Amino acid sequence: MSDTTDYVPPKVWTWNKESGGRFANINRPIAGPTHDKDLPVGRHPMQLYSLGTPNGVKVTIMLEELLALGHGGAEYDAWLINIGAGDQFSSGFVDANPNSKIPALVDRSGPEPVRVFESGAILIHLAEKFGAFLPTDPAKRAECLSWLFWQVGSAPYLGGGLGHFYAYAPIKIEYAIDRFAMEVKRQMDVLDRRLAETAYLGGDEYTIADMAVWPWYGGMAKGLLYEAGEFLQVQEYKNVIRWADQIGERAGVKRGRMVNRTFGEPASQLRERHEASDFDTMTQDKVEAAKEKAGG
């Protein structure tokens, strides 16, 4: 890799080396499948293919919140997509999401399966299908959707920008880190000012806007993303922290953030979810494993 001070871009870019960094093995400048493999299908109306990253957590929170409201049609199977192993490039996953990114949802509740990809689109699809977490009043709906799409447009600065250059890039580039840190702090200030005025992003109602923003900016406010909390002085954003704590206490959020999770404390991981009782089984299994490890 060239030194950043003397690199001159060629007239025509060619892919002749890995991009470097933690996820170099899954980055490529072409689309389409790399291998043939069908996606598994469970018995529930909703089939989710995902991973417990912030974008995946948005959808599992939504599904768990819908179930908590009594919407039985939101029962789902959550299948783990291991992006490090390239599961997202299987022929089955590419059929569900031609962009090869998690999450992908296949809604099998009707006569024909309906694929929905991109986390924001999935949230809207589910909200409209079940008539929940998306206001019907035109002004409130517009506010909710504005914050939802704010997140969709802003997250690349937080993930692919700051996350990459601060945490994952093979070399530390001061200019890149400064550029994205500045923008992330500006975004946190945008949120903090909004949440000084209202309980939730859309107003006084908890909506899909909160579900979309919380896994990213709530995690950042609590110092859970990229271990960059001290670097960004996230304690300054008191209103964001209040909101993040409030949402984090919801039962649907607690359950949703466990699904398809492959990192963190073992007790926080439910790698696949096929029945509501999986949470109870997981908890008991983790308790027994902890006792065994402790010798008791």
Image (spheres, grey):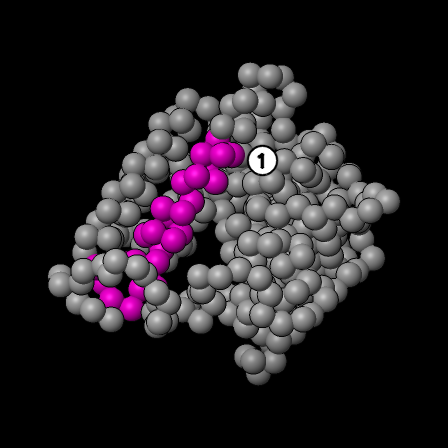
Q: Residue 220: x, y in percent?
A: 39, 48
55, 153: nearer the viewer: 153
Q: Residue 80: x, y in percent?
A: 63, 64
The residue shown at (13%, 63%) is 6
The residue shown at (20%, 69%) is 2
Residue underneath mark 1: 208
> Mark 1 Cα within 10 Å, few/some/many (few <14, many 20+)?
many
In the rendered structure, the answer to whether residue 59 lies left or right of residue 247 reads right
Q: Which residues are magenta?
A: 147-173
Q: Amino acid at mark 1?
A: Ile
In which quadrant is the C terminus drawn? bottom right
- The dominant secondary structure in magenta is helix
In the rendered structure, the answer to whether residue 117 lies left or right of residue 146 reads right
177, 265: nearer the viewer: 177
Task: Decide: is 290 above or below 272.
Answer: below
In which quadrant is the N terminus drawn? bottom left
Q: Residue furthest left?
A: 5
Q: Residue 48: x, y in percent?
A: 68, 54
Task: Decide: is 214 above or below 148.
Answer: below
Total numbered labels placed on residues in the image: 1
The residue shown at (67%, 41%) is 65
The residue shown at (51%, 23%) is 143
Q: Residue 25: x, y in percent?
A: 44, 71
- The kind of secondary structure element at disc 1 is helix
The reply to whether residue 267 is in sight is no
267, 274: nearer the viewer: 274
Q: Residue furthest right?
A: 111
Q: Is residue 217 magenta?
A: no
The reply to whether residue 184 is in sight is yes
Q: Residue furthest front?
A: 11
98, 69: nearer the viewer: 98
